[in-house]
Image (cartoon, grey):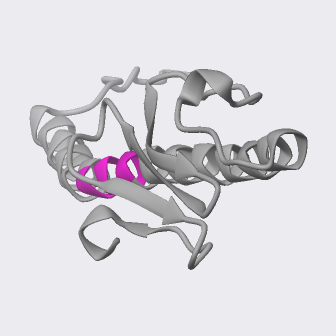
Amino acid sequence: MNIRKSNQGFTLIELLIVVVIIGILAAIAIPRFSSTKGKAFDAAAKTDLRNAMTAQEAYFSDFQTYASDEANLDYTATTNVGLNVVSGNTSGYEMTAKHSADGTNTWCINSTDGEITKAADC
């Protein structure tokens, strides 16, 4: 019984086709991943604003005025999110938040509206 041993392995053309397919898939996936990171940064900033809003209401309950400084608020900030209390007094407050890695979107909230919007809309 004479069995020929066939050459095993892939040809150069087959390997090139696989590399091209992987390149095409990567070209599609990478931009989608980048936009997902931006959404996550925005969500972190918005979450900090919601938590700070709750802390502002707790501060008002204790002192009958809203805090004018972030240091007076009892909440835990998210890493890389900067919160700024623009104003705080007996009549209301305004705060902004921005993720340091994002660089494009700044979000704000005030006691009048109670809704988180982009800073240009405040």
Q: How many marks?
A: 0
Q: Position of residue 71 (x, y in %)?
A: 60, 21
Q: Position of residue 102 (x, y in %)?
A: 29, 40
Residue situated in front as seen by the camera: 39 or 112: 112
28 lies above or below 6: below
56 lies above or below 100: below
Left or right: residue 27 compared with residue 106: left
Question: Which quarter of the picture shows residue 101?
Answer: top left
- The stretch in magenta equals 31-38
Asked whether residue 35 is drawn in magenta, I would say yes
Asked whether residue 90 is drawn in magenta, I would say no
Which quadrant does the N terminus fall into? top right
Residue situated in front as seen by the camera: 119 or 29: 119
Question: Which quarter of the picture shows residue 115?
Answer: bottom right
26 lies above or below 91: above
Q: Position of residue 121 (x, y in %)?
A: 30, 76
Left or right: residue 105 compared with residue 61: left
Overall secondary structure of the magenta section: helix
